[in-house]
Amino acid sequence: MKNDGKATKICLAYSGGLDTSIIMPWLKENFDDPEIIAVCTNVGQKEDWDAVERKAYASGASKYFLVDCREEFVTDYLYPMVRAGAIYEGQYLLGTSIARPLQARKQVEIALAENCDALAHGCTGKGNDQVRFELTYKALAPHLKVIAPWRVWDIHSREQAIAYAEEKQLDLGDISRQNIYSRDWNLWHMSHEGGRLEDPWNAPEESMFRLTKSPQEAPDKSTEVVIDFEKGIPVGLDGVKMEPMPLLTKLNDLAAENGIGRIDIVETRMVGMKSRGVYETPGGTLLHKAMRDLEMFTINYDALSLKNKLSQYYSDLVYSGKWFTTARIALEAFMVETTAYTSGSVRLSLYKGNATVVGRKSPYALYLEELASFGETSYDHADAEGFINLYGLATGVTAMVQKGLEDGSGQAVTMKRVAAQFHDK
């Protein structure tokens, strides 16, 4: 592939991994030795950042930026997503999906500040991330050229990518033909794909997991934690107020120690194919569990039913990279309004891979013990008869009409018959 347009200064979304490392020499070869601005975003992955910077310059970067956006990631992306109840296909907690709009946004901001004329990323042509990055580009800098090497070069596998890196004498770190898993890591989760996981019948190897203990190795006694919320947003643990990132970090530690947060799923990629992934989302699992319980405690049926329907749509938008869209922004306003009284505390018991709700309290609880009790209350049981008659009116009328037609009687459905059916005297 040769240069199909001018690109003299390219801003690359850089991770320090295999794909983005080999992209730099490839760009140099195919775009007449352009300047390459490498942008690395810290969203909670634990890296040797000095080593990443050295690798960036050694691979061909003209300039390198490391953007620490962990607080913004938790406050403006993760916690709103928890409030919305967004879980893709009912299982995936969207750890990679939710990070990409933020990472692409930071890349665009630096590209504009550095007067770049192109944006580049290392996403493959069959994955979801290419869409997430490029939809953000379109939303924030539609005039910039986009370069996606995986869609045009002659490298078609990770093995070939490793061979290209070795040819260019690039530092691969712990990447090898034996350690072939593709991973993504941030404050919310770690994903594992590729290698033996490509056969969906193969069980994950225990050595693959990096964040969580196995449930079998978790403590033999339960651990309790109370998560405090204000308006659907986590604000504290065990009655102590905490800043967003330390709170999530503490929950990650607690859940990981107790073997909580592992999931093995086959999801539907945006391009249509099914893809197997194993995810570790320790603290996020606890937050979703607690938030779902608290909203059932504080939101009425109609609002919660609608929220549950829209949560699925919200998760689809996040998965497909449509964060900076009218639909997602409008949905956010709905979620804020719906959870305006979702404040309170949820107590969880953690034990060997399981998180169980064992208590909840809220000043805005819609549960009233005086009404719900099986003991003596002010509730008049006789009121239920009239309610059932009205609630079942449509069902009864439908049955009478259809039964009359089916048995050939043809008897008209009159108000007198309806009244008789419902014991109106």
Image (tube, rainbow, N blue to C red):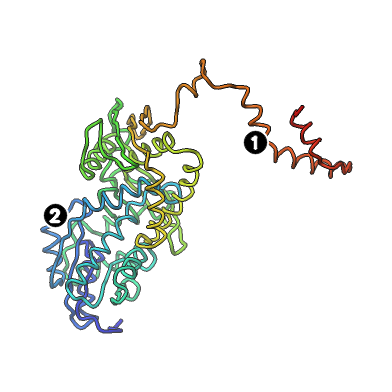
- Residue at 16% across / 69% down in the picture? 59
Residue 96 vs residue 71: left or right? right
Q: Position of residue 391 (x, y in %)?
A: 65, 36
Could you say which is closer to the camera, residue 273 or residue 186?
A: 186
Above/below status of 39 relative to 310: below
| SS assignment at label 2 | loop
Above/below status of 72 relative to 227: below
Quadrant of residue 56 in the image? bottom left
Q: Which residue is mark 1?
A: 391
Above/below status of 149 relative to 300: below
Q: How many marks?
A: 2
Dot 2 alpha-carbon crowd within 10 angstroms: few under 14, some 14 to 19, many 20 or more: few
- Residue at 81% across / 41% down in the picture? 413
Residue 41 vs residue 389: left or right? left
As drawn, the label of residue 48 is 2
Mark 2 or 1 closer to N-term? 2
What distance separates the C-alpha of mark 2 from that of mark 1?
64 Å
Q: Position of residue 104 (x, y in %)?
A: 27, 64
- Residue at 39% across / 35% down in the picture? 294
As drawn, the label of residue 164 is none
Which image quarter is the C terminus in? top right
Amino acid type at mark 1? Tyr
| SS assignment at label 1 | helix
